[in-house]
Image (cartoon, helix red, strand yellow):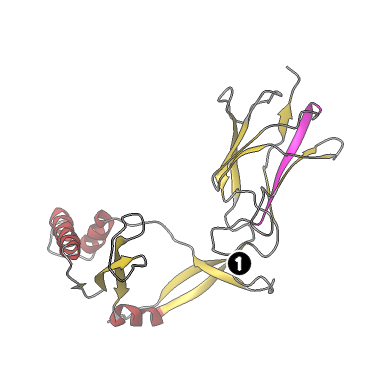
Amino acid sequence: MVNKTYTWPFNLHENAMTKDDQTDYLASVRILRTLTVEDIADGIVADRTEYRRDTIINISRLVENKIREMVYEGYRVQTDLARFSPSITGIFNRAGDVDPKLHKGDINITPTAEFREGLAHVKLVHTGRVRDKGGAEIINIIDLMTRQVNAPFTRTSVPCLRGRKIKCLNADGTGAGRLVLTNCATKEEFPVDRILENYPTRLTFQFPPDLPAGDYWLRIETYYTTNPSLLKKVRYITYPKPLTLIDA
């Protein structure tokens, strides 16, 4: 029985599934932090239970291990919070031939009706934050030749961008999107054609051979997202510090 009201603060981010609508957004709960069995035990102890913290932790882990073991053995397990059911992924032929690359054991976890009914006591509150970039960012840039981070680069340098959702893609999902260096003084743009690695958390490139020495802003233009569909409009990801190219 739920007898109090809870609050879920949430952020908004672009809905990549509706390409024709530029105004709709999806919400994601702003998670405070991830709690462990130890945290749960502390919470139970704080409720003035007669059980010791270590006892609660040990019993909880015994229950979790037994649930895991029983599901592995092929049982469906029902608790007050959820039902754990063995399942199988992949498409089979009529003979039922098993291909380890295509067919895997899986687990379906379904919350109970009582658990879901408690959601009626949850109040949703917008944090005021709209994640236009969906959490995409360039964290730092390392020179793979010298292993230095955010240091001046030379023409032989191989800059490696490390971040989140930085993979460069065109609107149709092909190619390598657009990576641009803009001279801080002249505002002249120099597209980067030599992208060596192009991953969501890592992008490596080579400087254009005719790029003059100077300070440059780096900008990624991409339609990449972790959702099945691409973004509806181009996403600009700019590194917050200028890159310095020197003649060495």
Whether the magenta-drawn stretch holds residue 163 is answered as no
Residue 220 rendering spot, x and y as whole percentages: 69, 47
Q: Is residue 67 left or right of residue 211?
A: left
Say which amino acid is labelled 1.
Ala
Instruction: Look at 56% across and 70% down and name the residue there.
Output: 26
Quadrant containing the C terminus is top right
Residue at the extreme right of the image, as rendered: 186
In this picture, is 201 found above or below 30? above
- In this view, the residue in front, 87 or 17, is 87
What residue would you read off at disc 1? 16
Q: How many marks?
A: 1
Q: Secondary structure at mark 1?
A: loop
Residue 182 rendering spot, x and y as whole percentages: 79, 40
Quarter of image, res 131: bottom right
Quadrant containing the N terminus is bottom left
- In this view, the residue in front, 170 or 215, is 170
Magenta span: chief secondary structure:
strand
Quarter of image, res 36: bottom left
Residue 203 rendering spot, x and y as whole percentages: 60, 41
Instruction: Look at 46% across and 70% down and name the residue there.
Output: 8
Instruction: Look at 33% across and 67% down and name the residue there.
Output: 92
In this picture, is 141 found above or below 127? above
Residue 175 rendering spot, x and y as whole percentages: 67, 50
- In this view, the residue in front, 65 or 222, is 222
- Mark 1 closeness class: few <14, some 14–19, many ≥20 residues within 10 Å: many
In this picture, is 217 found above or below 102? above
Instruction: Look at 29% across and 81% down and name the residue there.
Output: 114
Residue at the extreme top of the image, as rendered: 248
Q: Which residues are magenta?
A: 212-223
